[in-house]
């Protein structure tokens, strides 16, 4: 563990030589490709924000990642499925269902989806709120033609946050804010595009519940509930629903434009020890998978998202197959390796269920009687 003089991109405090740099020897990109470079993280001693050291090297890496960015490639572009009361549903469907249940949106309005990608969130949104007009932002226009096919889609903007135009009654950011170097400035810029009383919906990974998120190389911030709420308040958004888990392993914040912009830089002494614990757990899980691989005649990894990709990218990790429950992924390939259903794993195969502990344990138990042997990750007591 090294120490460096660093500047926090949340509170701008000079972290000084007391800021320890934590690292993983290799990582994964947020669009699920192995990243064979070191992932570095530190905790600001002034505000306890967990973040990447933002410098030219980090920016260069991110630029390289985004050059060939392709979300949900293994699923043919279909949005990732998440667990809900009905089993598995598209993430946006779960979020929109929750949002509709709150009854906070009027029958008509304009929504801006920041980082709209191929339009998964907007597609679900217009299905529920059929009289709203839709707009989106992205860093390029590669999906513009696809987005234009959405009903009541007004347009795609590719400008910087401070150059966006229009006024909106709702703004959404699903797995976007964690990529942004200065999240307060970003939300301030979006606040200027918000009509009075507009709602902001933000969803980010919860690294405390899902430590695999710490391995993502292009994430600028690894949010805790306290940091996410503080960022929103500083930018002039008053939380309506404080950060919680609408989707398992992810933090969802709902806020309304018009906050007082006051939030103190309060350090949390437990964050650094929790981060150290999660990173140690990650290394242990990878060693567990490598040990299982050495003794397996036919080895597979359950899951083709961030966790499974990071494990498959470990040194000397030869993976014969991936296993996934998502029908849109079964029959495709990930990293050139076939994806099969749990029931199609050959008898005597070993399948490592490399996911967050609660999910891993549930899946390993669910397929206990299958022909293959499904192995859960080691549990982390704090989880």
Image: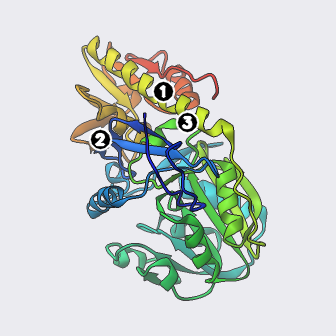
| Mark 3: secondary structure | helix
User: Residue at 22% across / 25% down in the picture?
Assistant: 316
Residue 235: in sight, yes or no?
Answer: yes
Mark earlier in primary sequence (2, 3): 3
User: Residue at 64% across / 65% down in the picture?
Assistant: 201
| Mark 2: secondary structure | loop
Q: Which residue is denoted by mark 2 in the rendering?
A: 331
Q: Is residue 23 above or below residue 29?
A: above
Q: Is residue 249 above or below residue 383?
A: below
* Mark-to-mark CA distance, 2 and 1: 34 Å
Relative to 380, 136 lies left or right: left
Q: Which residue is denoted by mark 3 in the rendering?
A: 275
- Where is residue 255? Give x, y as percent: 72, 66
Residue 326: in sight, yes or no?
Answer: no
Relative to 71, 369 lies left or right: right
The colouring scheme, among rainbow, by chain, secondary structure or one colour, is: rainbow
* Mark-to-mark CA distance, 1 and 3: 9 Å
Please identify the quarter of the rendering in which residue 94 is found.
Answer: bottom right
Residue at the outermost bottom position: 166
User: Residue at 42% across / 76% down in the picture?
Assistant: 147
Bin the neighbour count of mark 3 within 10 Å (Cα to Cα): few under 14, some 14-19, many 20 and up: many
Mark earlier in primary sequence (1, 3): 3
Residue 207, disc: none
User: Residue 337 or 192: which is nearer the viewer?
Assistant: 192
* Mark-to-mark CA distance, 2 and 3: 37 Å
For the N terminus, give its image quadrant: top left
Bin the neighbour count of mark 2 within 10 Å (Cα to Cα): few under 14, some 14-19, many 20 and up: some
User: Residue at 35% across / 72% down in the picture?
Assistant: 143
Q: Which residue is denoted by mark 1 in the rendering?
A: 280
- Where is residue 21? Give x, y as percent: 45, 41
Mark earlier in primary sequence (2, 1): 1
Please identify the quarter of the rendering in which residue 190 is found.
Answer: bottom right
């Amino acid at each position: 563990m090294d120490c460096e003089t660093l500047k926090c991109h949340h509170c701008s405090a000079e972290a000084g030589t007391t800021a320890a740099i934590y690292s993983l020897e290799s990582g994964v990109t947020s669009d699920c490709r192995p990243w064979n470079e070191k992932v570095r993280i530190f905790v600001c001693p002034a505000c306890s924000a967990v973040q990447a050291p933002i410098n030219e090297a980090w920016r260069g890496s991110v630029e390289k990642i985004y050059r060939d960015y392709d979300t949900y490639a293994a699923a043919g572009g279909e949005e990732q499925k998440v667990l809900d009361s009905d089993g598995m549903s598209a993430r946006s469907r779960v979020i929109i269902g929750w949002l509709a249940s709150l009854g906070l949106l009027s029958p008509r309005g304009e929504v801006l989806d920041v980082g709209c990608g191929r339009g998964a969130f907007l597609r679900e949104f217009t299905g529920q709120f059929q009289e709203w007009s839709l707009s989106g932002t992205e860093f390029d226009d590669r999906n513009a033609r696809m987005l234009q096919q959405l009903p009541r889609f007004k347009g795609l903007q590719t400008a910087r946050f401070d150059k966006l135009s229009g006024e909106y009654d709702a703004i959404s950011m699903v797995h976007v804010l964690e990529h942004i170097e200065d999240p307060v400035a970003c939300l301030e810029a979006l606040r200027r595009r918000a009509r009075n009383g507009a709602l902001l919906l933000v969803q980010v990974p919860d690294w405390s519940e899902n430590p695999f998120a710490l391995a993502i190389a292009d994430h600028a911030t690894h949010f805790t509930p306290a940091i996410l709420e503080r960022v929103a308040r500083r930018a002039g958004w008053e939380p309506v629903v404080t950060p919680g888990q609408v989707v398992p392993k992810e933090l969802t914040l709902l806020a309304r434009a018009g906050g007082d912009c006051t939030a103190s830089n309060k350090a949390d002494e437990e964050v650094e020890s929790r981060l150290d614990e999660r990173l140690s757990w990650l290394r242990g899980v990878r060693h567990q998978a490598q040990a299982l691989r050495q003794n397996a005649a036919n080895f597979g990894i359950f899951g083709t998202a961030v966790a499974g990709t990071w494990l498959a990218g470990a040194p000397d990790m030869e993976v014969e197959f991936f296993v996934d429950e998502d029908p849109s992924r079964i029959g495709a390939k990930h990293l050139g390796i076939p994806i099969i259903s749990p029931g199609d794993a050959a008898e005597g195969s070993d399948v490592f269920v490399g996911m967050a502990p609660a999910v891993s344990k549930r899946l390993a138990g669910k397929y206990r009687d299958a022909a293959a042997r499904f192995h859960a990750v080691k549990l982390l007591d704090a989880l």
